[in-house]
């Protein structure tokens, strides 16, 4: 049945291509389903692409269909940029992103594996292409709302398969891995939380917020729990400014209580489950008691080999993954480092790490300032969702392979950010 993914991939690719080449069609609106709007072909393609990031169409043997899908989407985004009515918006964060891409491209010249280095670049390339395409394609609040609601519908359906794994046998490989899916839910949770404040459907959006927050706790995915907490704190910071301190403190308190008093989380967090919060406050818990699933050992070994002697520029784009592919037994059959921070440091040094961090920080600030200064409710909604989800997803870089899952993970915050840029630009042109 997994080979059906080739058919699914071809169908969605052909539909996307036809959307781009079409004159558009009339469909139901995002704000009011009883009202219809004419969407251009470019807008239809955006809605399809943004809503289906959770669809991986993986094929475990013989063909890396996910990599092909990523490349095809990048090509289609470039096509969309050339066909869009408006030019893309190059904000400061995206200019820094371009500098980052240039830096990791330079890293190819001293990389131990040109092929793997190129694959790494393609994974980083997708979010900025998607963001630029969104800024050119989405200038209308209806398109923003329609694409966001469609993405939420797909995510909500995926929750069923996430919580009932045996159902995946019906569609093997169609959805991304649970870890990638759960990181996607961070953005969907924040979008639903934003809708709670910006729409009249309070109960519905509150339930959606809980729906996308629950899976990381049910499956005890510590990385996603952390990312969700950071995203909620960032949301509060944008919305309440200095008054957010009590809310952020509450998030930290809930996190501490979860770690030390929720047994499934505590058992996954510590080797000795008899430890208490007071033990931690008294400094009685050393790092050896934290259960990192041997990740700390792996990170230290990789940093010693690829970072310590080349801290500024790293050992070359793709260095970490090429080594792990060649020596799987050395890391317990792990082929990825489970930390994009570690991989960024080892591959492209402190320059790469700082450049990418600058992308996230400046994008967050851009979103926060837009929320504070703009009076348009839809743009403010998009801004707070983009900014909070950007920080939340970035936090998961600490202990997961977020960049590897960029179609499902990074596409969400950068997609929201691109839509914010597009709608904000159109607003300024209208004055």
Image (spheres, helix red, strand yellow):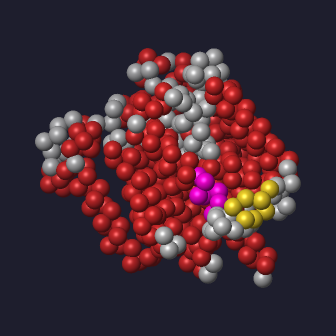
Q: In which quarter of the image is residue 407?
A: top right
Q: Where is residue 197 in the image (x, y as percent from the top left)?
A: 48, 72
Q: Which residue is drawn at 33% across and 44% down?
A: 218
Q: Residue at x 65, y 60 (%)?
A: 146
Residue 391 makes an appearance in the image: no
Quadrant (top left, top right, bottom left, bottom right) of the N terminus: top right
Extreme residue in the front direction: 34
Please name whichever residue, 76 or 351, is drawn nearer the observer in this view of the structure. 76
Q: Position of residue 337 (x, y in %)?
A: 47, 33
Q: Main secondary structure of the magenta part?
A: helix
Q: In which quarter of the image is residue 28?
A: bottom right
Does residue 251 appear left or right of residue 67 in this picture? left
Residue 146 drawn in magenta: yes
Does residue 50 appear left or right of residue 244 in this picture? right
Vertical arrangement, residue 242 with respect to residue 407, above or below: below
How many numbered marks, from 0 up? Answer: 0
Residue 311 drawn in magenta: no
Q: Where is residue 328 in the image (x, y as percent from the top left)?
A: 48, 19
Q: Residue at x 80, y 56 (%)?
A: 25
Please name whichever residue, 358 or 267, is drawn nearer the observer in this view of the structure. 267
Vertical arrangement, residue 281 with respect to residue 285, above or below: below
Please name whichever residue, 261 or 339, is drawn nearer the observer in this view of the structure. 261
What segment is highlighted magenta in the picture? Answer: 145-151
Q: Position of residue 277 (x, y in %)?
A: 17, 53
Please name whichever residue, 25 or 128, is drawn nearer the observer in this view of the structure. 25
Q: Residue at x 40, y 36 (%)?
A: 164
Quadrant (top left, top right, bottom left, bottom right) of the C terminus: bottom right
């Amino acid at each position: 049945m997994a080979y059906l993914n080739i058919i699914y991939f071809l169908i969605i690719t052909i539909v996307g291509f036809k959307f781009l080449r079409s004159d558009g069609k009339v469909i139901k609106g995002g704000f009011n389903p009883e009202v219809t709007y004419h969407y251009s072909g470019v807008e239809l393609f955006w809605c399809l692409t943004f809503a289906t990031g959770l669809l991986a169409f993986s094929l475990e043997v013989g063909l890396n269909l996910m990599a092909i899908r990523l490349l095809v989407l990048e090509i289609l985004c470039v096509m969309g940029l050339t066909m869009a009515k408006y030019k893309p918006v190059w904000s400061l964060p995206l200019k820094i992103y371009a500098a980052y891409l240039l830096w990791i491209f330079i890293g190819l010249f001293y990389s131990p594996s040109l092929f793997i280095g190129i694959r790494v670049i393609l994974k980083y390339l997708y979010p900025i292409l998607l963001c630029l395409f969104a800024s050119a394609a989405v200038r209308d609040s209806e398109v923003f709302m329609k694409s966001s609601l469609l993405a939420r519908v797909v995510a909500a359906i995926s929750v069923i398969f996430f919580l009932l794994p045996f159902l995946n046998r019906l569609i093997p490989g169609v959805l991304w891995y649970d870890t990638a899916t759960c990181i996607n839910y961070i953005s969907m949770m924040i979008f639903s939380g934003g809708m709670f404040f910006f729409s009249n459907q309070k109960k519905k959006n509150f339930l959606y917020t809980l729906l996308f927050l629950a899976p990381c706790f049910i499956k005890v995915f510590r990385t996603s729990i952390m990312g969700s907490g950071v995203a909620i704190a960032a949301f509060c910071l944008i919305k309440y400014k200095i008054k957010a301190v009590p809310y952020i403190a509450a998030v930290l308190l809930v996190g501490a209580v979860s770690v030390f008093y929720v047994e499934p989380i505590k058992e996954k967090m510590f080797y000795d489950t008899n430890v208490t919060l007071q033990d931690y406050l008294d400094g009685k818990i050393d790092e050896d008691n934290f259960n990192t699933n041997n990740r700390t050992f792996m990170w230290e070994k990789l940093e010693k080999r690829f970072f310590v002697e080349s801290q500024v520029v790293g050992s070359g784009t793709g260095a970490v993954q090429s080594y792990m592919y060649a020596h799987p037994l050395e890391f317990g059959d792990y082929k990825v480092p489970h930390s994009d921070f570690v991989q960024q440091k080892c591959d492209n040094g402190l320059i790469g790490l700082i450049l990418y961090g600058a992308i996230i920080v400046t994008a967050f600030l851009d979103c926060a300032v837009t929320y504070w200064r703009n009076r348009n409710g839809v743009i403010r909604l998009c801004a707070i969702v983009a900014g909070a989800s950007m920080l939340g997803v970035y936090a998961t870089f600490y202990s997961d392979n977020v960049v590897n899952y960029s179609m499902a993970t990074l596409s969400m915050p950068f997609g929201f950010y691109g839509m914010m840029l597009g709608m904000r630009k159109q607003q300024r042109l209208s004055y």
